[in-house]
Amino acid sequence: MRLRPPGRATWARDPRRAATAALVTGPLAWLFHDAATPAAAWWAWPGAVLCAVLGAVAVAGYVAPHGSGRLVERGCTPCAVVPAASIVGGLLMLDTTPGGGGMLTAVVLLVFGLQQRRTSAAACAVPVRVAPPGA
């Protein structure tokens, strides 16, 4: 058995993860827009949709790959907590500071959470079965 980080191509092509991201984007967009509503600026909806897409892709990272036999891909504790905390932190940032600085900080938090979920191979490598040569 060899340890290998989850690949980006495999991560992006999984139909269950894509469906999860699509289903979660709408409610997250509404939550982010609701948190940024007092600003009522032109960028409230585009910013909310950007935050929702970043958050939805991070949430989709918790869905186990197709054919793994699991429902949830939690990973180690930092890999599991940081993306979820970044979504909550982004919502809190928009709620407390609904201006452009709050939206920018929310986007930065969500990008960091998504990056943590997708590329933290050093923190939690995933065991992968390697087929013997010639099989």
Image (cartoon, rainbow, N blue to C red):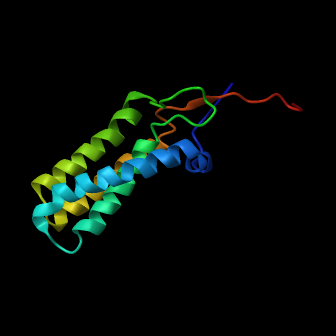
Work out which quarter of the rendered image holds the C terminus and state it. Answer: top right
Q: Position of residue 86 (x, y in %)?
A: 29, 45
Q: Position of residue 16 (x, y in %)?
A: 54, 42
Q: Nearer the viewer, residue 16 or 129?
A: 16
Residue at 50% x, 29% y is 71
* Observer able to see residue 111: no
- The number of numbered discs placed on residues in the rendered structure image is 0
Relative placement, left or right, of 10 versus 37 is: right
Work out which quarter of the rendered image holds the N terminus and state it. Answer: top right
* Observer able to see residue 90: yes
Residue at 60% x, 45% y is 7
The vertical placement of 44 against 52, above or below, is below
- Name the quadrant containing residue 46: bottom left
Relative placement, left or right, of 77 versus 44 is: right
- Name the quadrant containing residue 40: bottom left
The vertical placement of 78 against 18, above or below, is above
The vertical placement of 121 against 99, above or below, is above
Q: Nearer the viewer, residue 34 or 57?
A: 34
Q: Nearer the viewer, residue 8 or 25?
A: 25
Residue at 37% x, 53% y is 25
The residue lying furthest to the bottom in this view is: 42
Q: Position of residue 104 (x, y in %)?
A: 24, 63
Q: Position of residue 37 (x, y in %)?
A: 14, 62
Relative placement, left or right, of 8 versus 101 is: right
